[in-house]
Amino acid sequence: MTDPLLTAAYAAYGWSPEVTVAPGPRGALGRIWRVRTPAGQYALKHSFETPPDGRLQAELHLTRRAADAGVRVPATHPAADGRLQVPAPGGGVLRLYDWVDLRPIDPAAADTPERLGELLARLHSCAPAAGQQEPWYHQAPDAAQFAAFTDQPWSARLDRLLTDLPQLTGALTPPDPAALRVCHRDLHPENVQAGPDGDLVVLDWDQLGPADPARELVQTLYAWFTIDADDAATDASNNVSNSVSNSVSNSVSNGVEAGAGDAPVGDSAYRRAEDRMAACYAAYVDAGGPGRVTGPGDYTMLLADRLNFLLHQARIAADPGTSADDRAWAELEIDETLRLLPTPEQLRVSPARIGRTRPAAPGPPPDDPRRAQPGRR
């Protein structure tokens, strides 16, 4: 075996030569291998970054509570010495999970908004209170940091962003410390899929940390129900379905009609996206979810996270020392992030439209006993 990472995995988990490891999908922050052993199949994940102190324990605590609330979470398995995460050669950590045969959820399916809203309600209702949130989720880079990329193939695409950036960042507000709960913070379609029995399975808890439930709700709505303006224009002229480009592993197939991205707010595709977001939000409220969409400030986490991620990927792509594989991946992430950023116009009109059928006042806080087991419609 020549791959140092897999050599380290065999040693750490005590695998015999009869254990086989095959490459699986990769994302911006990690890569998966499928492990076949005499005892069963597992997913070996290499997270490219080492998590901060305390995150593993916070993850174990939240996933136990989530499982008790009816959320499906793949079990994690220790290495031979009992560690749940193993340092990886070259950086990052290795984790071993149950392998679950999954299939993607179609964002355009009629029942997806309701199922997703109920899932979010369960996650938020069982989430414990959290401490201070990292600036990444409520502060954004300034224009000068993006303007520095002048000689890249994708530099011209930043021009529109620089035009919109003052209005986007003007919507950002610090979170209310009293509202912060421990949340998943990365609930895009690749991280919520259907298991063999059809139940939703929540994956990849690596970005877990403090968030306002309302802000994670908005972040999730836009991760699931967005497309770009070109897709919207195609839909308007041809009345055909569009593709969702949110998958690190192409797990959401082309041909799926989605939502808005940077489409005009009066566009038919955008209004359908808002309808799905409103349906998801309604299901979330009905299932006991504590967050309430009240205005542009609820877009803070969505905007700050995407803008910081965009800058991070731009730095990777522009670094002469980046490998060709990592540069290609970073450029894909740049393209997707630029296409899926909300517009200033959406910030002005969408919060009221999404929350048009629900009250603004939240119910009991997440730790209230009445929220322990949110109901289903």
Image (tube, rainbow, N blue to C red):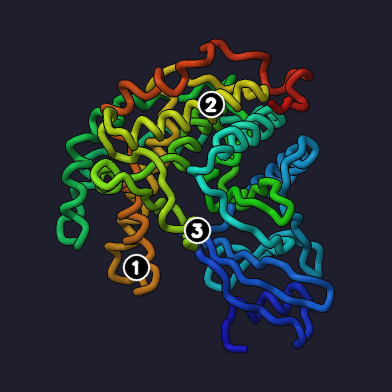
Whole-number angstrom distance, CA of label 3 to CA of label 2 = 28 Å
Residue 21, position as x, y percentages in the image: 66, 78
The structure residue drawn at horizontal position 32% and vertical position 61%, both measured from the top left corner, is 331
Give the amino acid at mark 1.
Ala
- Answer whether residue 135 is visible to the viewer in this image: no
Q: Earlier in the sequence, mark 3 or mark 1?
A: 3
Location of mark 1 (residue): 328
Give the amino acid at mark 2.
Tyr
Give the amino acid at mark 3.
Leu
Q: Is residue 71 left or right of residue 234?
A: right
Q: In front here: 23 or 16?
A: 23
Q: Is residue 207 left or right of residue 370?
A: left
Q: In front here: 146 or 249?
A: 249
Q: Secondary structure at mark 1?
A: helix
Q: Earlier in the sequence, mark 1 or mark 2?
A: 2
Q: In front here: 135 or 364?
A: 364
- Answer above or below: position of 170 versus 208: above
The structure residue drawn at horizontal position 80% and vertical position 38%, both measured from the top left corner, is 68
Q: In front here: 114 or 204?
A: 114
Q: Which mark is residue 281?
A: 2
The structure residue drawn at horizontal position 25% and vertical position 28%, both measured from the top left corner, is 167
- Answer above or below: position of 195 versus 376: below
The structure residue drawn at horizontal position 74% and vertical position 82%, both measured from the top left corner, is 19
Q: Which mark is residue 29?
A: 3
